[in-house]
Amino acid sequence: MSIKNQIYVVICLILCSCNSKQKEVAQETSKPNIIYILADDLGYAELGVYGQEKIETPHIDALAKNGMIFTQHYTGTPVCAPARFNFLTGKHSGHSYVRGNDEWADRGQVWNYKAVVQDSTLEGQRPIPLKTITVANKLKESGYATAMVGKWGLGAPHTASIPTNFGFDYFFGFNCQRQAHTYYPVHLYENDKRYPLANDTIAPGTKLAKDANPNDASSYANYNLNEYASEVMFDKITQFVDKNKDKPFFMYWADPIPHAPLQAPKRWVDYYIKKFGDEAPYLGKKGYFPAKNPRATYAAMVSYLDENVGKLVAQLKKEGIYDNTIIMFTSDNGPTYNGGSDSPWFDSAKPFNSQYGYGKGFLNEGGIRVPMIASWPNKIKAGSKTDLISAHYDVMATFCDIVDQKTPENTDGYSFLPTLLNKPNEQKIHDYLYWEYPEYYGQVAIRMGKWKILWKELKKGNKTIELYNLEEDLAEKNNIADQHPEIVEKLFEAIKKEHSTPDVEQFRIDALEAVYNIK
């Protein structure tokens, strides 16, 4: 071969190599970015597209207009930590390691805010096992840059149970969910290190001074300090997106909003004061901090979160990556009842009951049915809606399906990607959804088609089981269990099949163990 021909062959090989690398890059960047936004205690009807009439959420509503609304989407558990575990692992609450909020109290003064600030070994919740596989692990295996910003609640500093050991390249936010009981904390966490904020040590639960005038805005100055946690966290989100805009990324954004305490940027509070008018101050009798204008402040928190969703979408569009980004927006459970929030006034769980005993902490529809919006331009039909009965623990399978990864074994979810892509004939349907929850005296429930079976206060020895036809009774007012014993029996069949004895003793419900062990 002549030198000329040799040079030609070498050039061809180089060009082929370059073309191959370009194809690899193109294939890599064609993977959609995935953003999962988990609000905290946001009720089913606290968004405009779900019927909210007092709080304004134009940016989240726009996601729905350009995507799909889920009308029958559920959390895995009606409180913070276990709901997050259900989402991250794809396991329902009968198989979860975390089944309730466990503050790991045998360490000492874990509820003493100032003591925790001084001693970081008191922060965090009981650690989850290091062998736990999360959705972040699976996406990382598929070449995704992964980050979590917000509230973790599944471990503690100085333990292995921190986000960066569970598939997240980067973490910023509240490691400990108790520390998230103020939006003006002394510190947050960046990966495994404290990130100091220019705030004073004002402990959650601090009341107004005895001589303070509750109608004077200056009396509340201690509850509105310098650095608002949600603002600092959102800045980290925009930085992560900017840094990873040229490759596929996964962002789990778990903002504490609108979980009490009632603290929000003044401009938004002022907006709602003008809209709502005068109201009675909240003086802190139901925990957290006093607030001069509690309803205005609560609405301000939701609209502030909505504003940031809009800013994130604008950033994605500016960078030219919006069309290749899946955004899902949901909540960890139904609306709360404490800290000065007023769920009945906002009708937060409409059409379900928003009163205490039916929202957060309970397996009634108001506590577990949550808003869910999915947006993916040119993939999900704009303005679409689905009645698919689905849950947080389906997200693991869905994300694995999107990136062509095998779903981990021993998970409980089904991918709802076929529904997102308008392929209903390919959608696998749950026979039922299953819940068990050891707190608030112990509860268990299943959702099976139009039927909802609910058994509450198991730890009190209650033997009354409730059955509701949700096609006729969304408010769960008419217990018709005595009319359909054959359907009630399905609950016991589900317990025998779905329950497993919890690893953590405090999550045990003896009445369920008794049913489970009947063969």
Image: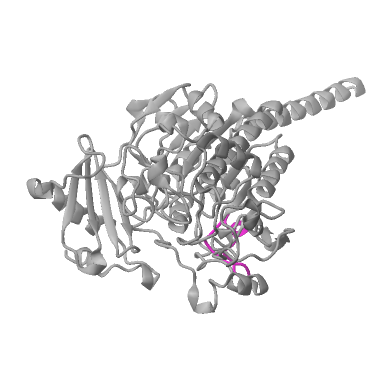
- Quarter where residue 244 is shown: top right
- Quarter where residue 209 is shown: bottom right
Specify whether residue 113 is in view.
yes
Q: Position of residue 135 (x, y in %)?
A: 51, 48
* Residue in the picture at 56% in, 39% down: 273
Specify whether residue 1 is in view.
no
Q: Which residues are magenta?
A: 152-167
Q: Is residue 482 left or right of residue 59?
A: left
* Residue in the picture at 31% in, 37% down: 429
Residue 153 falls within the magenta-colored stretch: yes
Q: Is residue 45 left or right of residue 240?
A: left
Q: Is residue 470 left or right of residue 254?
A: left
Q: Position of residue 9 (x, y in %)?
A: 82, 24
* Residue in the picture at 52% in, 66% down: 125
Q: Is residue 149 left or right of residue 475?
A: right
- Quarter where residue 365 is shown: top left
Residue 449 falls within the magenta-colored stretch: no
Please, what is the dominant secondary structure of the magenta stretch? loop
Question: The N terminus lies in which quarter of the figure?
Answer: top right
